[in-house]
Image (cartoon, helix red, strand yellow):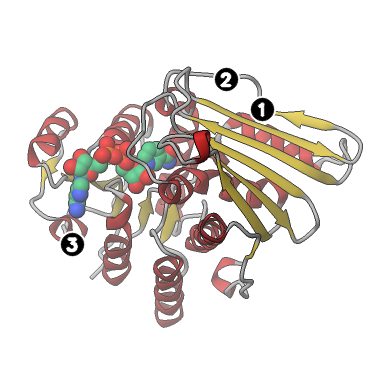
Amino acid sequence: MSHPRSDPLRVGVIGTGAMGRDHIATLDRYVARARVTAVHDRATELADKVAAPVGARVLATPDALIDAEDVDAVLVCSPDPTHLELVLHCLEAGVPVLCEKPLAVTADGTAQVVAAETALAQRRGGGRLVQVGFMRRYDPAYVELKRDVHDGSQGDPVLLHCVHRNPSNHTGMTPEQVVGNAMVHELDIARWLLEDEVVSVSTRTVRRGGTWQPGDPVVAWLDTAAGALVEVEVFVNAGYGYDVRCEAVGSTGRSALPDLVGPDFQTRFADAYRLELQQWTEAVLAGEPTGPSAWDGHRATVVATACVESLRTGRPVEVPTEPRPALYA
Ligand SMILES: NC(=O)c1ccc[n+]([C@@H]2O[C@H](COP(=O)([O-])OP(=O)(O)OC[C@H]3O[C@@H](n4cnc5c(N)ncnc54)[C@H](O)[C@@H]3O)[C@@H](O)[C@H]2O)c1
């Protein structure tokens, strides 16, 4: 069962690959009110390497970490298919969890998290425990862009052009994985930036020589409830750098992210990860997380599922609407 949280917050990290290592370093350097006390990775030698420098211990299983007496909150940084079971375990244990995106790989899975968190909050009379790692919402340039979209200076939102390009040679990813793992960031940012819901989608891949070449771009068009159109390009094999762009066009003006091409996601979004972890820590210590919720994680995966269905059928797909549970009002 859950135990009282200490200050500084004692954080356990599951998964010490690229993302886990980056979060551990950020917590250690920049988050004064958090301490990494425990880590677990299926590859124990990776956990061993990161644990000693921050004074954490290595635990043999994710279950042992979630239930540990010296863990107040958990960061899930293991591969996408592991997220659902780990987050459900955190909920059962009453432990706050920041889960990397996506919250789960299917919309059924993300719905299970929403149902479990909602039932727990009703039973305990408490609030949220889950936050999803949509860290772009903390990026200062995205925050400024959102201010521009809503301050009246550019009229009503009409179009959003989103571009997500990775430098590396991700030739192992299927178009479905590009949508579920990478495009999901854009699907969340469109909802957040426009404060609107996606109601239908149309998705295509590039087909060089008449066929999909692994790593080639996937492009989606999203219609929102208010009538804006969002165009999304995800190109995980762009070669030249890590390049995330977003232009918001309104009925009387436009604004865009600055040109910030970098070598990798860790460099481009360093401030966003730091602010995400600082604000998550403060919010958990104050009672409950306030960042992107299980509901946000669920809706992003519902839209991603529709995008995959559109890829499969070659047709536009309606996105199912659902009432937002009161916990996420
Ligand atoms: N928010 C972002 O911008 C962002 C960026 C990159 C990755 N991510 C997410 O972070 C997660 C990790 O991605 P990554 O790039 O660090 O991958 P990675 O492959 O570098 O690291 C994953 C780690 O998890 C370990 N692992 C595998 N199965 C495990 C299990 N069952 N239990 C515990 N550990 C296990 C692996 O040994 C590896 O060390 C993914 O869900 C990914 O989508 C998010």
Q: Earlier in the sequence, mark 3 or mark 1?
A: 3
Does the numbered disc 2 mark a residue whose Cβ is under 8 Å from ligand 1? no
Single out the mark in the foreground, 3 or 2: 2
Which mark is on residue 257? 1
Whole-percent x and y of residue 318?
A: 65, 66
- Amino acid type shown at disc 3: Asp
Residue at 32%, 39% in the rendered image:
172
Residue 290 in the image: state x and y as whole percent.
Answer: 52, 54
- Look at 55% across and 38% down and name the residue there: 206
- Where, quadrant-wise, is the C terminus in this rendering? bottom right
> Helix or strand or loop: what does disc 1 sit on?
loop
* Residue drawn at x 35%, y 31% as measured from the top left: 26
Q: Is residue 28 above or below residue 155?
A: above
State the SS at label 3: loop
User: What residue occupies the far front of the structure in this picture?
Assistant: 209
Disc 2 residue type (three-letter) = Leu
Local packing at callout 2 (Cα closer than 10 Å; few below 14, some 14-19, many 20+) is: few
Taking depth in this image into account, of 167 and 292 the one nearest to the observer is 167
Q: Which residue is mark 3?
A: 67
Check the image and report above or below for 130 versus 252.
Answer: below
What residue does disc 2 label?
260
- The answer to which image quadrant residue 215 occupies is top left
| Mark 1 CB near ligand 1 (8 Å cut) | no
The quarter of the image holding the N terminus is bottom left
